[in-house]
Image (cartoon, rainbow, N blue to C red):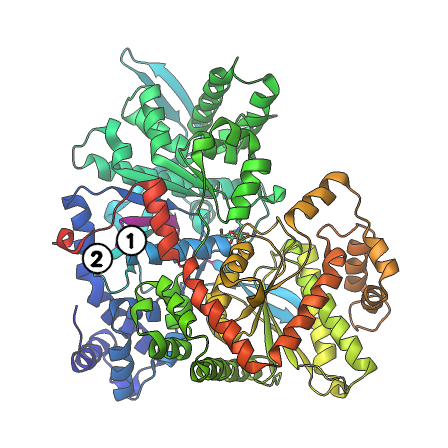
Amino acid sequence: MKITQERFVREFKKQLAEKFALDVKDAAPIELYQTLVSVVKSGYSEIWRNTWKSYVKNDQKQVYYFSIEFLPGRLLKSNLLNMGWYDVVDKGLKQMGLSLDKISESEVDMALGNGGLGRLASCFMDALASDGLPGNGNGIRYKYGLFKQKFVDGYQIELPNEWLTDGNNWAVARESKAVDVLMGGQVHLIDNGKYLEAIYEGADVIKAVPYDTGIVGYRNDHVNTMRLWDAQIPASEEVKYPTIEDRRRVEDLTSVLYPDDSNYEGRILRLKQEYFFTSAGIQSIIRHYKKYDRPLNEISEHIAIHINDTHPAMCVAEFMRILLDKEHMDWDEAWQQTVKTMSYTNHTIMAEALEKWPVEMLATVQPRILQIIQEIDRRYALELEGKKDHDFIERTRIIKDGMVKMAHLAIIGSHSTNGVAKLHTELLENDVLRDFYELYPERFNNKTNGITVRRWLQVANPELSKTIDQAIGTAWRFDAKKLHELEKHVGDKKLLEKIGRAKLDNKKKLAAFIKEDTGIEVSPHAIFDVQIKRLHAYKRQLLNLLHIVKLYLDLKDDPNRDVEPRVFIFGAKAAPSYHYAKTIIKCINEVANMINNDKTINDKLKVVFLENYGVSLAEKIIPAADVGEQISTATKEASGTSNMKLMLNGALTVATLDGANIEIKDHVGEDNIFIFGLTKDEVLEYEKNHHYYAAEYYNSNPVIKRVLDAFVDGTIPNIEVEGHEIYDSLLRVNDEYFVLRDFASYVQAQEAVSEAYKDKQNWNKMCLINIANAGYFSADDTVEKYAKEIWDIKPNSTEMRG
Ligand code: 26W
């Protein structure tokens, strides 16, 4: 829809009057926000409908991206940008005395995810729509999003995130598209002469109601759907649930997002959630497919289903269940269609994250699904008999020792398994999934992660975006790879200065936010050094902290030391049950307190731990970052995506050779990144031969000794318990993630950072090279590769939209 400023203002006032019977001057921020959402929604609703109709009309193959997490954050600005309305609305609001920035702050983040996995799913949603690809999301509409984090006395406190209190203004509930999901009870197979009939007894019927959110493509008249399911009680079953507690048992299914990241906990409610959104999604896909009388034995030519990590791995069995039990297809044909339809992405090699469910638990949640998995497993083993040795079969089968291995189900039941960065895929092939790679080499492939440059640069960093426009025009806004043209301008001193100025402006804004949020005063001229990601031992926020303590002790020795002032900024949530991660949070907070209140060090060092890290906070921090910390132990971080967001915004990376850091280094070159630490081979060698002794580093390196002692000798106040815990984890439990092994190398890299920052022009040049090469990590390209190489789907052309 074309919009002019005049028309927008008229429409806005009209809807404000209709919705709330108010004038602009009397409306509260939330009322203004809700009105703006309605105007925006009415701006794309017709396109949304047309996009959907065009898929049907052109009989286009579509992909359904199944993910137990989506982490879109706020949608207002990103929708405005993608619709091409941003500037007009910005001006129109100003004309009415309003501010888009302020109104946008009224939007509560949609935080239905923990971290990397969920945010990747949302970047992919944006990219699918912007590529004009037929792609739909399928997930859960949690009533409570990821917990809200507060610090009390330096400790993390979790508060419920009731994001729906003001209603979700973007989603449309579609009662008419509800499906029933069966759980529990018993199942019997009866031969009725024609086929085996599955008879369910005593199962609970749960009504799955879809909430659809439009995903607006970038200036291409294309709007896809993200469908999230809510659990409700079907009208026919009301009498079965007479009390409030009974009802709650059902509704609780979609109440909370599990706050664990890379840590598997075998809770039955979680398994129920997994089956619930999987079954609802598969049922609605097949029902829709059948509406147009197409043969089911060709379904894999019309739809692709993507399994985002193993949480939706029951897709394989549920798809089989419908084809077998409802459509009476024979096993072999159903299996062929299933494998051709499904594809799977692995997001982690951390052993503790690999899902295994006890057989009995699956029997309680859905006995028919268990039967089908058992049959898949039986046939798998039978097929390999005589071809592979007994051990191989036992290692790779789906059910072993009474546990169902979800990754094995996903690999065996799909035609594609991919990792999320080159190194990660290599580790899958040669190590973690070696047997499967030997068995199905053709199924394995790499798809390095990507990010949406629209949200992470155009929306989050308008200052830098404008600077880039002035240098190379606006084509990069449509094709991020064109950012590479910036490299031609490395010698342009004016441009380098402008890049520096944009950064300084963003740092001033962040400094103001920090002051308001925490009371801490920071100088925008200091180096802003940022580590933002979930708190996890393998991500090594602790290594960062040890270095900070070293810098502090150095300054205490000599307050007049000539050092580049630095502000270390952290953002991180710990899983509520992850004790060690919470201990690290407490220690960071206490170190911050100690340093920020020490007048003797002349403001050369500040430490800021911002509360409640999430998408919207990331949008404030990233544009202001000078340095990005990507310091996981090599082999542990599958890819990382904040590394890409930070480089895109002109931050320089301090990194181990882990995940996508390696590819970043390959693109920017060794001179434009600060690499340190053990390599993959060195880590694997240590892990294999068990000859790492952390205490040796403590005993032989006086700096390490002094820093660690500070945790237990009272130097750092208020961590009597936590300090010892850290100390012991490194020296007694032998430092699982090689923090002490990498310490010296890390300090050296950080010294190189300080040295480099002294030459502002050269620093800005390095920033430019990082920005110029960030286009390589555009989700648009990543998703295009998924489309071509895995899903076999094609973009909608303009004519097709009709
Ligand atoms: C069962 C508990 C659980 C929950 C979440 C297990 C595993 C997960 C996720 C797979 C963890 C996750 O978010 N992994 C991250 O995925 C990103 C997107 O691919 C990568 O960039 C990160 O490196 C990876 O840690």
Task: Classify 102 as above or below 399.
Answer: below
Dot 2 and dot 1 residues touching (CB under 8 Å)? yes
Q: Position of residue 168 (x, y in %)?
A: 35, 63
Q: Residue furthest top?
A: 193
User: In this rendering, does residue 784 appear at all?
Assistant: yes
Identity of the amino acid at label 2? Answer: Trp
Q: CA distance from mark 2 to mark 1?
A: 8 Å
Identity of the amino acid at label 1? Answer: Thr
Q: Is residue 250 magenta?
A: no
Tag of residue 694: none
Residue sitting at x 44%, y 47%: 447
Task: State which quadrant residue 775 falls in.
Answer: bottom left
Q: Position of residue 517 (x, y in %)?
A: 56, 79
Task: Classify 443 as above or below 658.
Answer: above
Which mark sits nearer the N-terminus, 2 or 1?
2
| Segment colored magenta | 132-144
Residue sitting at x 34%, y 83%: 99
Residue topped by disc 2: 48
Q: Quadrant of the C terminus?
A: bottom left
- 447 or 19, which is in the foreground? 447
Tag of residue 225: 1
